[in-house]
Amino acid sequence: MKKKYYSIPVIGFCLLLIATGCDFQIGNWARAKYERTVQKQAPLASGSTVVAQTSSGSITITGADVADCNVVAEIRVRALTEEDARETAEQVEIILEQVGNTLTVKAKKPHKKLKRSISISYDITVPKQTNVECASSYGPIKLGGINGHAKGKTSSGSISAENIQGSAHLDTSYGSVTCRNITGDNIKVKSSSGAITAENIRGSADMDTSYGSITCEDISGGDLKLRTSSGKIKLSKASCGDFDLHTSYGSIRAEELTGKVLKLHSGSGSIDVTQASADSADISTSYGRITCRQLTTADLTAKSGSGDINIACSDSTSPEINANVVTSYGSVDFEAPPDFAGSVDMATSYGSISTDLPITISGQISKKKLAGTIGQGNGKLYLKTSSGSIKIRWPDKPEVN
């Protein structure tokens, strides 16, 4: 018997059709198409919850100055014949079901047949003071103008949320997520495969993508957690409690940050920080350089498995900073805060050591190791590299006339 072999793309496509519930058969496609629009309306009290779900199609929910829930449903049917497509579309019933303070928008469909597909997209307008919950198996979601809790989930499609006053939970398996002007106690954004973009966010936020970049600007009001397994992270103009930024494969770029704890980690990528202030800063990368400019902190840890480290403290940094800066392969350039006072410990296995600051040496003098003190204080500088040069610089000061 001759064996049959099936390619991975064909098998994957077959599994996709099964998962979607589409009534197609390979080799016998439904070519006829029929579209039908249905409008529904129901009174909706302020503070109610609207729930909408579709297996295939988009969902748009917009808050406005209205007293009703207005639904426009676009029904699209594909079948072998135009007559079958039209008859199937006419059998689809859009239902608005009210139970307590919850209004559910749903569709009653005819029994499934082979070689046929049904797609239903919703465009819903609700009072601004409404909680919304929506889900689509295959289709984008768009939410806007909502003064309430917002939940949106799609298995395959992008999500957009704008002008939300309340907690927001946005989740897509395959697609990007865009958030703007959201204020809430609990903001969660997740994509299994897609980029995340957030702007003007107020409140604690947790954003996670497995494959995609994360770009955030103008974030404040709570802790911020950004994670991606593979992608870049860019964060600017943020004032938060604790910062936790993590990427397994990608670079991190951060600027104009203010917070209590600053934690940045890249498994493989450079880290670039400009104008950041935090009580403590923990910055690390397994493979990549670290560059910090205008950094204000009292407790600094900066580590690279392979890459140069360049740190420039701001004039506001405590003269008694505790800094631990280590790289395995690369140079260390450290610009100390003005009037630094404390102990200094520098060591390199292969490279040179130099300092612009007058150090009182303690112990043996060596080209590879230098330990001593600068002034009278409790500051600590520990700078080390296995292969590379080390230099401590003094910040430029304006001349006094």
Image: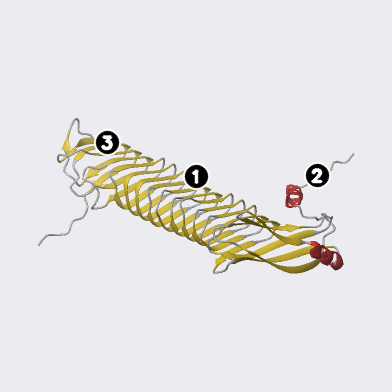
Task: Give the quarter of the figure containing the N terminus.
Answer: top right
The amino acid sitting under disc 3 is Lys
Q: CA distance from mark 1 to mark 3?
A: 33 Å
Q: CA distance from mark 2 to mark 1?
A: 37 Å
Q: CA distance from mark 3 to mark 2?
A: 64 Å
Dot label at residue 248: 1
Closer to the observer: label 2 or label 1?
Answer: 1
Q: Residues within 10 Å of mark 3 (few under 14, many from 20)?
A: some
Closer to the observer: label 1 or label 3?
Answer: 1
Where residue 105 appears, x then y in whole percent?
67, 58
Q: Label 2 belongs to which residue?
A: 5
Colouring scheme, one of rainbow, by chain, secondary structure, one colour: secondary structure
The amino acid sitting under disc 2 is Tyr
| Location of residue 287 by image quarter | top left
Residue 52 vs residue 311, the one in the foreground: 52
Direction from residue 70 to residue 349 in the image, left or right: left
Where residue 2 appears, x then y in whole percent?
88, 41
Tell me if residue 200 comes above or below residue 5 in the rendering.
Answer: below
Q: Label 3 belongs to which residue?
A: 368
Q: Residues within 10 Å of mark 2 (few under 14, many from 20)?
A: few
Q: Are marks 2 and 1 in contact (CB under 8 Å)?
A: no
Q: Residues within 10 Å of mark 1 (few under 14, many from 20)?
A: some
1 or 3: tag closer to the N-terminus: 1
Direction from residue 193 to residue 111 in the image, left or right: right
Q: Residue at x 79, y 67 (%)?
A: 33
Could you tell me which secondary element the residue under label 2 belongs to? loop
